[in-house]
Amino acid sequence: MNLREGTRRLALLLGVAGAIAGGFASYLELQTLTSQRARHDRFEIQANSDAVQQDRKDFLAGWVSIDPKTGERIQWDQQVDKDGIKTIHWTKDNEIESIEAEDGQTLYPTPAPSAWLYLLIALFPVLGFLIPWGVVRSVGWVGAGFVQPAK
C-alpha cells in the first residue's frame, strides 16, 4: 500500500472536483451580479433622463408634497408618459422610490455591485481546488505519521 501516492492522487481528484464546483458557483454568482448591474444601469438611465430631471425641477419649483390634514410630507406619484416612463413614485424626501416604465416594468433603485465581488467570483474555482486539496493533503500528512514503519 502506497499511502503517499494514494493521498496525492485523492487530493488532486478532489481538488479538480472542487475547482469544477467552484467554476459552477462562479458562473451562477456572475449571472446574479450581471443581472443586478443591468437593473442598476437601467434605473440610473431612467432616473437621470431629461424627462425625470425636468419634472423634478418643475415640481420642486412650485409644489411641496404635504398632507393637508397632518401637515407632514407625503409620498406622491407623478404621471410622466414620455421617454418610456409612465409614472414616477416619489418618497417623502422627494427622492425617486420607483419608476414605472411604459412596458409595465417597475424599476427600483438598486446599488451597483462592488468591484470586489467580481474578484471574489474569479477566486471561486481557485478556492474550490485549494480547500479540498489542502484538507486531503493535511489529513494524509497526519495519517502518514501513524503509518510510518518503525526504524
Image: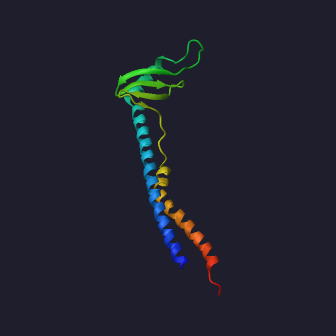
Closer to us: 95 or 145:
145
Question: Residue 92 location, x and y as percent?
Answer: 54, 24
Q: How many marks?
A: 0
Question: Residue 96 location, x and y as percent?
Answer: 48, 28
Q: How is the image coloured?
A: rainbow
Closer to us: 14 or 98:
14
Q: Residue at x 53, y 79 (%)?
A: 2
Q: Against 105, is 131 above or below? A: below
Q: Residue at x 51, y 69 (%)?
A: 11
Q: Residue at x 47, y 44 (%)?
A: 113
Whether residue 98 sits left or right of residue 136 in the image: it is: left
Q: Against 57, is 45 above or below? A: below
Q: Residue at x 44, y 54 (%)?
A: 24
Q: Indicate the quadrant where residue 52 lies.
A: top left
The N terminus: image quadrant: bottom right
Closer to us: 54 or 134:
134
